[in-house]
Image (cartoon, rainbow, N blue to C red):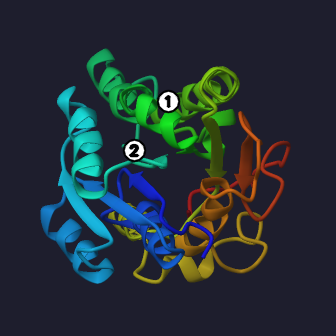
Amino acid sequence: MRLDNKVIIVTGSCTGIGKAIAERCVAEGASVVIHGLEQDLGEEVVRQLGNEKSVLYIGDLAEENTVKKLVETALTAFGKIDAIVNNAAIVASSNIHDTDLNFFRHIFEVNTLAPFALIKEALPHLTKTSGNVLNIGSVNAYSGEPNLMAYSVTKGALMTLTRNLGDTLHRENGVRVNQINPGWVLTEREAERKREHGLSEDWYKGVPAVFAPAGRLLKPSEIASAAVYWLGDECGPVSGQVVELEQHPFIGRNPPKDTSTI
């Protein structure tokens, strides 16, 4: 198995991409720390994965003590840390007109500063195992959607953090840091958000071809499959890299004139 005997912390793993990554990690032989805000959903993930291979910590990443508790949870349950997946993020609508500084700071706290803090807290343990970090970003890091301003900016900052630490920590600590930038993924939360915007229950079946040439959106499990490569030993010494996971060339593509239906 590709992740045999590895211990991996996956933030935001009660649902969506994080949950899919945690499931795939366990399938590949790893033990995982499940994290999120939803106690019931987290407990269900642990039941599914098994207590011998997973442990749950519920905590808000905006609170300073959470990253310390995540590291302590991994060490208490499994004795070491081989990798961190910084997946948790707040995806919230915002633009320059409706975004105040307090809101912007909160998005930064969870989406960018918490990954930094968790890497720093876990670094001594990652150094011992020649471990690695995988940050989950977004193609929105390059410019962003009109109403995802704050989220997009935090993902751009995370991308710079990845490239910076991917060089520094690899040289100084033997710890790799890489990032994948998913495109449009059909998670539970994404389906719910679009329904809240007034779209039909099966809106994802009619996504315009300009956004989904394959006729469907990406699946969380497909992002998880890519994550395994970076979390394991197959990628060798590769560090400081950012890879887009989308079904079309995102940068440089002209958007359709009418995006009101998505």
Instruction: Please tell me which residue is depicted at 81% across the width and 60% down the height of the picture.
Output: 248
In percent of the image, x 23 and y 74: which residue is there? 51
Task: Specify the quadrant of the image occupied by residue 173.
Answer: top right
Residue at 29% across / 41% down in the picture? 71
Q: Badge 1, how many Cα within 10 Å: few under 14, some, many 20+?
A: many
- How far across and down, in percent of the image, does residue 212 sit? 72, 70
The residue singled out by tag 2 in the image is 89
**Residue at the image point whose x is 43% and y is 55% from the top:** 8
Assign a secondary structure to mark 2. Answer: loop
**Which is more toward the observer, 38 or 91?**
38
Q: Which residue is mark 1?
A: 154
Depth check, front residue: 163 or 33: 33
Judging from the image, what secondary structure is the residue with disc 1 in?
helix
Mark 1: which amino acid?
Thr
Kindly report the distance in space between the C-alpha atoms of the residues bearing marks 2 and 1: 9 Å
Give the amino acid at mark 2.
Ala
* Circles 2 and 1: CB atoms closer than 8 Å: yes
Instruction: Estimate the x, y position of residue 233 in percent, counting from the top left.
Output: 68, 56
Indicate whether 152 appears above or below 262. Answer: above
Quadrant of the rendering where the C terminus is positioned: bottom right
Question: Where 192 falls versus 131 (above or below)?
Answer: below
Give residue 11's position: percent from left, percent from top: 36, 50
Q: Is residue 172 visible?
A: yes
* Residue at the outermost left position: 39
State the residue in front, 193 or 50.
50
